[in-house]
C-alpha cells in the first residue's frame, strides 16, 4: 500500500474544501439546468481546467455546481457552447478568469498550499455563518 505524500493530502483537502464552499455558494443547484443536486449527482465543475492553472484551481470564481448530466454530457462535450453560455451568464467572472489564467505562478511550496487552505477554511466558516 502506497502512502500519499504531504502534497497529495493537502491537494485533496483543498479540493474537498472548495467543493463544500461551492455547494453552499450555488445552493446545491446545477448552474445549467437549475435542478437541486446532491451526493454523486453534484459535481464541482471548473471553468478554467485544473490542469491549465493551479492558481485558479481553488478560486471560487472558477467553479460551479453542475449535475452529472450537464457536467459530463454538455459542459465537457460542448466546450464552445459551454464557454459562450458561461460568458453570457457571468461576464465579470469570465473577464476575471481570462485575465488570471495566463498568470504564471512559480513552483508551489507547501506554504502556498497552506495559505490556500487557511483561506478556504475561513471562506467556508463565513459561508456557513451566513
Image (cartoon, helix red, strand yellow):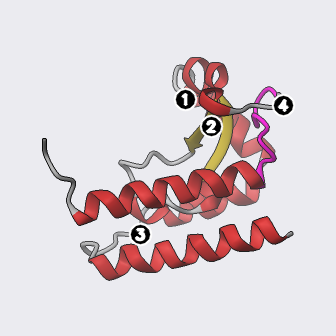
Q: Which residue is pictured at 63% across the width and 64% down the height? A: 96
- Please provide percent x and percent y for residue 12: 39, 54
**Residue 79: assigned label:** 1
Whichever of labels 4 and 1 marks the residue nearer the N terminus, that label is 4
Q: Marks 2 and 1: in contact by CB < 8 Å?
A: yes
Q: Residues within 10 Å of mark 3 (few under 14, many from 20)?
A: few
Q: Between disc 3 and disc 1, whose residue precedes? A: 1
Residue beneath disc 2: 83
Mark drawn on residue 103: 3
Range shown magenta: 25-34
Q: Closer to the observer: label 4 or label 2?
A: 4
| Residues under numbered marks 3 and 2 in contact, where contact means CB atoms less than 8 Å apart | no
The answer to whether residue 92 is above or below residue 47 is below
Q: Residues within 10 Å of mark 1 (few under 14, many from 20)?
A: few
**Upstream in the sequence, badge 4 or badge 2?**
4
Distance between mark 1 and mark 2 Cα atoms = 6 Å
- The image shows residue 125 at horizontal and vertical percentages of 70, 72
* C-alpha gap between disc 3 and disc 2: 20 Å
Amino acid at each position: 500500500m502506497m502512502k500519499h505524500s504531504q502534497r497529495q493530502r493537502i491537494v485533496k483537502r483543498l479540493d474537498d474544501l472548495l467543493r463544500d464552499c461551492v455547494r453552499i455558494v450555488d445552493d446545491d443547484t446545477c448552474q445549467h439546468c437549475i435542478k437541486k443536486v446532491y451526493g454523486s449527482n453534484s459535481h464541482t465543475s471548473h471553468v478554467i481546467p485544473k490542469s491549465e492553472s493551479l492558481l485558479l484551481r481553488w478560486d471560487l470564481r472558477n467553479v460551479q455546481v453542475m449535475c452529472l448530466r450537464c457536467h459530463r454530457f454538455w459542459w465537457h462535450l460542448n466546450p464552445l457552447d459551454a464557454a459562450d453560455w458561461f460568458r453570457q451568464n457571468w461576464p465579470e467572472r469570465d473577464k476575471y478568469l481570462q485575465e488570471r489564467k495566463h498568470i504564471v505562478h512559480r513552483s508551489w511550496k507547501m506554504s502556498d498550499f497552506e495559505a490556500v487552505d487557511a483561506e478556504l477554511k475561513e471562506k467556508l466558516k463565513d459561508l456557513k455563518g451566513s
